[in-house]
Image: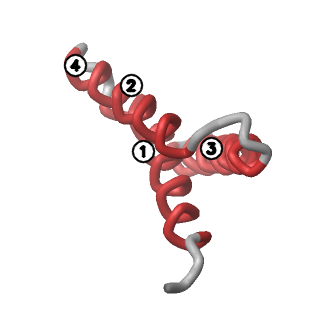
Amino acid sequence: MNEEDIAAILAGQTAAIAVICELLIKDKQLQRDDLCRGLYDLLERHRMANANVYSVGPIRHLLAILEANQHALKPAE
């Protein structure tokens, strides 16, 4: 398995987690802002611990999806 294969697997898993998060947000089981804040805290803990750069990729990907959906789902003013 090469790096592209691993990246594709992680991207698929992150996308699936994002769908689950969106369903929980829609059902009011999660608050998007709280979830994103928690993920940013997790990124900061990884940075402070000098974690492997690859370990933050899925977290950043999930944040990007959640934040993009937040902007896409807002009603037009």
Q: Circle 3 sits on which residue? A: 14
Query: Of tags 2 and 3, which is closer to the observer?
Result: 2
- Say which quadrant the N terminus sits in: top right
Residue drawn at 69 percent across, 45 percent down:
25
Residue 62 placed where, x, y %?
53, 46
Name the residue type under label 1: Arg
Residue drawn at 54 percent across, 84 percent down:
76
**Could you tell whether 21 is left or right of 69 in the image?**
right
Name the residue type under label 3: Thr
Question: Which dot marks residue 50?
Answer: 4
Say if mark 2 contacts mark 1, CB within 8 Å.
Answer: no
Say if mark 3 contacts mark 4, CB within 8 Å.
Answer: no
Q: Is residue 35 above or below residue 77?
A: above
Say if mark 2 contacts mark 3, CB within 8 Å.
Answer: no
Question: Which dot marks residue 42?
Answer: 2
Q: Earlier along the polypeptide chain: callout 3 or callout 4?
A: 3
Q: Is residue 76 above or below residue 8?
A: below
Q: CA distance from mark 3 to mark 1?
A: 10 Å
Residue 56 placed where, x, y %?
39, 34
Query: Of tags 1 and 4, which is closer to the observer?
Result: 1
Q: CA distance from mark 1 to mark 4?
A: 16 Å
Q: Circle 1 sits on which residue? A: 60
Q: Is residue 15 above or below residue 53?
A: below
Q: Residues within 10 Å of mark 1 (few under 14, many from 20)?
A: some
Q: CA distance from mark 3 to mark 4?
A: 22 Å
Q: Residues within 10 Å of mark 2 (few under 14, many from 20)?
A: some
